[in-house]
Amino acid sequence: MFGSPCYWVNGNMFTAVHQESIIVRLPEPERAELLAQPGASLFEPMEGRPMREYVVLPPRVLEDREALQGWIGKGMAYAASLPPKQKKARKPRA
């Protein structure tokens, strides 16, 4: 996805690299907590098209290995709590 590394659990993406940023998928309480930090923002891969559950990690978090692992762990736990995505059946080739 986005031509960069993405990480999934049960078919649900929870973190990815996008350009020079790392994004993480979070539930509302943790999302609000992270967005309150300077430099964090909602992930918007295209202008005007935010991915509402995903937050761009601020530079301070990227510089702190323990904080980075913590936020990615929260994202993984959230994605694991979501219903598994079923693989779509492939259409037969014509």
Image (cartoon, rainbow, N blue to C red):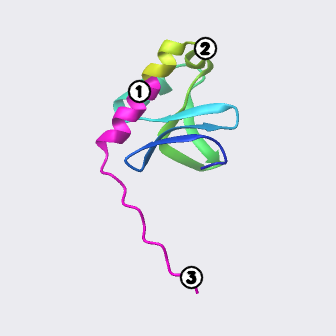
Front position in the image: 57 or 13: 13
The amino acid pointed to by label 3 is: Arg
Q: Which residue is mark 1?
A: 73
Front position in the image: 94 or 30: 94
Q: Which residues are drawn in magenta? A: 71-94
The amino acid pointed to by label 2 is: Glu
Q: Which mark is residue 93?
A: 3
Element class at badge 1: helix
Above or below residue 78? Residue 11 is: below
Residue 15 placement, left or right of 18: left
Residue at the image position 55 percent from the left and 12 percent from the top: 64
| N-term-proximal mark, 3 vs 1 | 1
Element class at badge 3: loop
Q: Which mark is residue 63?
A: 2
Where is residue 48? Give x, y as percent. 61, 50
The amino acid pointed to by label 1 is: Gly
| N-term-proximal mark, 2 vs 1 | 2
Element class at badge 2: loop
Q: Which mark lies nearer to you, 2 or 3?
A: 3
**Magenta-span inclusion, residue 62:** no
Q: CA distance from mark 2 to mark 1?
A: 16 Å
Residue 6 placement, left or right of 19: left
**Is the residue marked by circle 1 packed among few (<14), some (14-19), or many (20+) residues within 10 Å?**
some
Q: CA distance from mark 3 to mark 1?
A: 40 Å
Where is residue 36? Give x, y as percent. 48, 22
Q: Which mark lies nearer to you, 3 or 1?
A: 3
